[in-house]
Image (cartoon, helix red, strand yellow):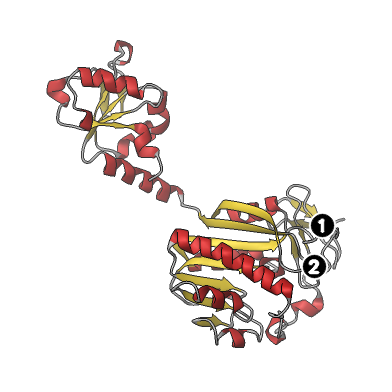
Amino acid sequence: MSVMSTCPCCRHEEALQPSPAYTQCSCCGHRWRLPPEAVSSVGYYEALVARNDPQTPWFKRKISDRVAQLSTLLEESGARRVLEIGCAEGELGSAIKARFAVTYDGVELSRDGKLAKQKLDRVFQTPASEVDSLPYELIVSFHVLEHIAEPEQELSSWSRLLAENGQLLVEVPNQSGHPLLTSDHNPEHLHQFTPASLVLLLSHCGFSCEELSVGHYESPLYQDSIRVIAKSLLTINDRQERLLARFRERLVGPLIVYGIGGDFHNYLAPLLDKLDVQALLDSSPAKWGVKYGKNVVSAYDEELHQEFPILVCSLRFGAEIKQQLIKLGVRPQRLVELQAVYADD
C-alpha cells in the first residue's frame, strides 16, 4: 500500500516516492522530497562558507539584475526598511545601500553572515522564525525557498515580519532551473517549483501575487528562475472596512442611494446595514414601495432629500441618472457615482 503525501503548494495528495526521488503533484506540477540525511543534519547550513564568488561574471550578472529590480521597487514604494532572507555575504544589500537611504537587514545561517555584518545594518544568524524586529516594507528572498522542508511555515515567518502594505519578492528555480535538465539533482534543493505551484503556495500562505516573471538568471546552472512580487492578502473584515472607509470619504455623513437595479443589489445592498443610508430612490414606479432593511424605495422629493449627498448606483446608466437629477434641481456637487467609490485611489 502506497504512502500518500500532500503537495505543499496546492494540497493535492500524491503517492510518496521513496527518498531521494521527488514526488510530483499531478495538479500543479510541483516536485518535493524529504531532505537527504547529510543536508538534514543539525548545523549543516551553519557550517557552510564562501557560498558565492563575487568575482565571477555570472555573480555580477545576477547582482546587477537584482539591483535593478529592487531599485524599481524602492523607487515606486518608497520603502525604507528592507530584509533579505538568505543575504549570503551581503553584496546585494551593500549595492542597494550605496544607492538608497534604507535600513537593510539580512538573515543568513551560513558563516558568510559574518561578512554580511560588515556591510549591512543587521544580520540575523538564526532562522526567520526567531527574528525579532520591527516590520519591513520590503522582504526579498533569492533561491532560498527551494531549500526549506516546510515552505508554508517559512512563509508564515516572513509574513509576520512584513509591514501592512509591504511587498515580498521571492525567486526560486523554475522547475530544474535549466532548460536542458529534466530534474534538479542538487541535494540541498527539496522543491522544484512551477509558476503555478509557487503562486498557489503564496496564496495559501496569505499573499496576493502582483507580478510573476520567468527566465531570471542565477548562475550557469540555474538560468531560468521564477520571480514573484506579492503583498499580504487582506482578511475579509479588512477588505470590508477599507471599502466602507471609501464610502465614508466620498459621501461624508448620511447619504441617499439612487438607482435600485443590478449594481445596487450586487455592490451596495450587502453593505446597507453598515452605511448611514437615509433613503432609497428610483425613477421606476414599479420599484416604489419595495423595502430593503429600514428603507422603502420611493421617488426623489426635493423637500425631503435636499440635505444629503446622492450615490448614483448604476455604472451603465449613471450619466443618464445624473442628468435627470440635475434637471430636477439637484446640484452636481451632491452627486457621487458608484465607480468613484470603487475606482483605484
Where 85 falls versus 255 (above or below)? below
Disc assigned to residue 179: 1
Q: Nearer the viewer, residue 35 or 213?
A: 213
Mark 1 element type: loop
Residue, x 78% and y 64% (percent of image)?
Answer: 33
Mark 2 element type: loop
Residue 250 on image: x %, y % = 28, 40
Residue 245 on image: x %, y % = 32, 46
Q: Neighbour class for label 2 at 10 Å: few (<14), some, many (≥20)?
A: some
Where 214 falls versus 189 (above or below)? above
Q: Nearer the viewer, residue 186 or 103?
A: 103
Residue 238 on image: x %, y % = 41, 51
Residue, x 45% and y 71% (percent of image)?
Answer: 81
Question: Of the residues shown, which amino acid type is indicated by label 2?
Answer: Leu
Where 156 falls versus 197 (above or below)? below
Q: Nearer the viewer, residue 302 or 286?
A: 302
Where 251 falls versus 17 (above or below)? above
Query: Looking at the image, can residue 169 be seen?
Result: yes
Precedes in sequence: disc 1 or disc 2: 1
Q: Position of 97 compared to 61: left or right?
A: left
Q: Position of 200 compared to 98: left or right?
A: right
For the view shown, which residue lies furthest in the left direction? 303
1 and 2 marks in contact (CB < 8 Å): no
Q: Neighbour class for label 1 at 10 Å: few (<14), some, many (≥20)?
A: some
Residue, x 46% and y 62% (percent of image)?
Answer: 75
Question: Of the residues shown, which amino acid type is indicated by label 1?
Answer: Pro
Disc assigned to residue 267: none
Q: Position of 70 compared to 220: left or right?
A: left
Residue 243 on image: x %, y % = 37, 43
- The residue that disc 2 covers is 221
Tell me the quarter of the image containing the N terminus.
bottom right
Disc 1 from disc 2: Cα separation: 10 Å
